[in-house]
Amino acid sequence: MMQKLNDVMINETQSLKVLLLELENQHKNIVTNDIFGMEACVNKIKAANKNIAHMEVLRRKITENKAMGPIIEAAKNPELEKNFHAIKLLLQAVVLQKDTNELLIRQGLSFTNRMLNVLNPVREAKTYNGYGKVKK
């Protein structure tokens, strides 16, 4: 069982590395404003996520939906501990990269919306609300 678990964890580590590379590629496309490159990244990221989910299902079958921490401690296998630690580090890196990409996309959308409002302002008449503030 421990060997199967170790093999699944190694495959999961490789899948996480692929996802991290795709997210870094997406980051490069966001920074360079390559719209078609960003669009191409979407399917690759979806495929990497699907592969990670498959590995997660296999791991949960082996561990019978138990938490990994106690299983790793009970096994006292240094290779298993090393792989578990590597997966945790990769997951942190993936989450950080994903959050960075989302933030950059939001910034770009905010800037675009402000520029559109400058170029084509709202033409409605301004009205006052009950507090005396101008309603846009």
Image (cartoon, grey):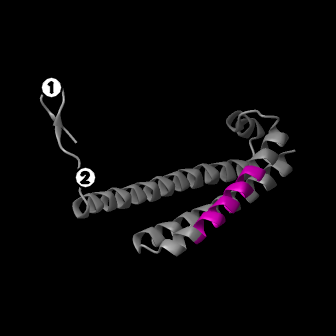
Q: Give the range drawn in magenta.
A: 40-54
Question: Which image quarter is the C terminus in?
Answer: top left
Q: What residue type is labelled 1?
A: Tyr
Left or right placement of residue 71 versus residue 23 in this view: right
In the displayed structure, 22 sits above or below 89; it is below
Instruction: Nearest to the eye among marks 1 and 2: give it.
Output: 2
In the displayed structure, 24 sits above or below 57; it is below
Tell me the SS state at disc 2.
Answer: loop
Mark found first going from the N terminus, 1 or 2: 2
The residue that appears at 71% across and 38% down in the rendered structure is 68
Q: Does the magenta stretch include residue 45?
A: yes
Name the magenta segment's main secondary structure. helix
Per the rendering, the mark at residue 122 is 2
Tell me the SS state at disc 1.
Answer: loop
Q: Where is residue 130 in the image (x, y as percent from the top left)?
A: 17, 24
Q: Position of residue 62 (x, y in %)?
A: 84, 42
Per the rendering, the mark at residue 131 is 1
The residue that appears at 23% across and 47% down in the rendered structure is 124
Left or right placement of residue 52 versus residue 22 in this view: right
Nearest the eye: 132 or 97: 132
Nearest the eye: 134 or 123: 123
Q: Which amino acid does label 2 sit on?
A: Val
Crowd class of label 2 (few under 14; some 14 to 19; many from 20; radius 10 Å): few
Q: Does the magenta stretch include residue 101?
A: no
